[in-house]
Amino acid sequence: MAEVLVRNPWRVTAHVWHALFMREALARVTADRIAWFWLMAEPIAHVMLLVWVRTLIGHARLIPGADFVPWLVVGVTTFILFRNQMNRGMNAISANRALFAYRQVHPADTLFVRSGLEGVLSTIVMLVLIIVFTLLGQNLIPNNSLYVIGLWCMVWLFGLGAGLVFSVVVTVLPELQKFISMIMFPLYFLSGIIIPVQYFPQDIRYYLLFNPVLHLIENIRFGFFEGYRLVDGVNLLYPTWWILGALVLGLLLQVRYKFRLLAQ
Amino acid sequence: MIEVQDVYKRYHGPFGGDWVLKGVDFTIPGNVSVGIVGRNGAGKSTLLRLIGGMDAPDKGKITHHCRVSWPIGLGGGFQGSMTGRQNVKFVARIHGGNDRIPELIQKVQDFAEIGKAFDQPVKTYSSGMRSRLAFGLSLAFDFDVYLSDEATAVGDIAFKKKATKAFHDRVGKASIIMVSHQEGMLKDLCQAGVLLESGSAIWFDDINDAIKQYHESLGK
């Protein structure tokens, strides 16, 4: 007989994370016959397609201090990291509902594990893109690598925080799911990903700067390109408060609504 | 020993919800198997979920000083898109049995006897196959108390015999708390009984008395 040992809570969590990681990774790779291929190809194709479309129709191609294509690649990939973290985190709970039959598995565990897995995948995609575009002759080698890595982790954490918050919100108030996806769509245009924030007039920029994602993306570009000029008002402190706020609020909500999330 | 102290539970749906359990209070001594009876919707599964720690009571407290399994039932416990083998591995891992996975898988396979289906997604299983797998999986671990929520209801005769035998083999080492409408099975496996009726629980030291009282309450 396999003995059920009394383990300390940290060990239990470590075991649960390992089990969930194996499950999530397997689910991602074996979802369908070409899942392992799509894993990498889909985000890369997404970026490539956007870059291609944007270079075709673009007239605002002059970015102070950066080449247009690398500038776009950095923005889109970083935004996809955030969006993936948030969306996949939001759905982590419903995707793993059956596994909450085991009291060792907390809803928040599924989010942490997903966030880790998705983050690693996104990071690999970023590295592949850097290699590909460098080989194509574009300048996509980070000027200040440490700064870029730090910002990348901040976006990662912000996505996790947003996932923690919204997973509770859509479980407790399912009606809000529709609004959240509606808000996500304009965020694409308001975060300076395909339209440079420099092109907006001063008084509109004032409102755009309330968006923490814009700050993070502009900053990561600043780390990539030597001589990239940040717009006045873009800083690091403002998104940092958002990240801390999202993480703390998310964790609090996860504790408060744990049993609501567990309920079938 | 499991103490259920003055437990209240209601479900908060979008349109409110009525009390399911209102002041349920009893103590299950160690090594005593208990059958829970009551009509549909009386709160039997809810009580089992609370004992299993999957849900928290709105008021009151449940304490256990022993290792309690997850509620083995028809509904949850398996991720439909994963194969039987993957589900077993998952459960083994969260219980810290990572290094004993082959041994556990062998044990579950021997008990469940579902053949090649073990490597098919669980969503393709019939309910009998699911309950075979669920039962085999929980029996592969050494719990003090097993919780069974109608897990044997859909099994064939061979499976019921097997499940009964497994518990008879463990008399003195492990007990079972079971929700069931199969009175033969209850009488065979349980000593004590709990009757759930309109939110409260009545404890019977003898399962036969509990079943008799249940029949009388239905007759009214």
Image (spheres, coloured by chain):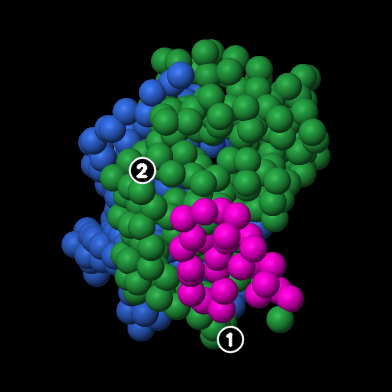
Chain colours: A blue, B green
Q: Amino acid at mark 2?
A: Gly
Q: In screen coordinates, is B220 left or right of B175?
A: right
Q: Which residue is mark 1?
A: B15
Which label lies toward us, 2 or 1? 2
| Residue A21 in the image, given as x and y percentages of width and height | 46, 33
- Alpha-carbon distance for marks 2 and 1? 40 Å
**Discs 2 and 1 carry the same chain letter:** yes
Looking at the rendering, the stretch of residues picked out in magenta corresponds to B194-219
Q: Residues within 10 Å of mark 1 (few under 14, many from 20)?
A: few
Residue B7 appears in the figure: yes
- State whether residue B54 is above or below residue B24: above
Q: Write the residue at 42% across / 15% down.
A: B99
Q: Quadrant of residue B61?
A: bottom left
| Residue B2, image x, y percentages | 35, 52
Q: Residues within 10 Å of mark 2 (few under 14, many from 20)?
A: some
- Specify the quadrant that holds the C terminus of chain B: bottom right
Please state which amino acid type lies under the numbered disc 1.
Answer: Phe
Please indicate whether residue A86 sits to the left or right of residue A91 in the image.
Answer: left
Q: Residue at x 63, y 33 (%)?
A: B164
